[in-house]
Image: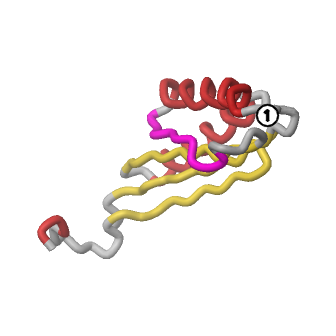
Amino acid sequence: MALGYVGVLTVRVEMPWVGNLKEKRALVRPVVERLKVRFPLTVARLDGLDAHDWEVIGVATLSNDYDWVRETLKMAADYIAAEGPYRVTGEHVEITVLGEDGDDDDERGS
């Protein structure tokens, strides 16, 4: 039986009309901050930080309910797509099972 699930969503957004990093941050950062407030998620700007026309946003959540993790990540993806003045060009979801092998050992001491 699974102990829990960790869900990770990565979303690539592109804005080819943006000419500088300051303008890009002004488009992406508000969406990232609103995601943190609206959903029980950890959110980070992962890649493309030095590029002015694209960025990868990462989202993570943890629960003992697989369907809740899946649905929460879907809502986050929909929110990212709807809220920002950019184009979503890539999206990837990965849900990892925790404790599936039934191993009760505490690995901190290993």
Residue 83 seen in the figure: no
Q: Position of residue 65 (x, y in %)?
A: 42, 50
Q: Position of residue 5 (x, y in %)?
A: 41, 56
| Range of magenta residues | 40-48
- Residue in view at x 53 percent, y 44 percent: 59
Left or right: 17 as drawn, with respect to 34: right
Q: How many marks?
A: 1
Left or right: 16 as drawn, with respect to 109: right
- Residue in view at x 63 percent, y 43 percent: 49
* Kind of residue at badge 1: Tyr
Q: Was residue 108 drawn as part of the magenta stretch in this picture?
A: no
Q: Nearer the viewer, residue 36 or 19?
A: 19
Quadrant of the rendering where the C terminus is positioned:
bottom left
Q: Position of residue 7 (x, y in %)?
A: 49, 53
- Residue in view at x 31 percent, y 67 percent: 99
Q: Nearer the viewer, residue 23 or 67?
A: 23
In this rendering, the answer to whether 64 lies above or below 22 is below
The residue sitting at the right extreme is 17
In this rendering, the answer to whether 107 lies above or below 45 is below
Left or right: 95 as drawn, with respect to 74: left
The residue sitting at the left extreme is 109
SS for dot 1: loop
Quarter occupied by residue 79: top right
Q: Position of residue 9 (x, y in %)?
A: 58, 50
Left or right: 89 as drawn, with respect to 21: right
Q: Nearer the viewer, residue 68 or 92?
A: 92
Question: How many residues crowd mark 1 within 10 Å: few (<14), some (14–19), many (20+)?
Answer: many
Residue that badge 1 annotates: 86
Quarter occupied by residue 19: top right
Prevailing secondary structure class for the magenta stretch in the rendered image: strand
Rendered image coloring scheme: secondary structure
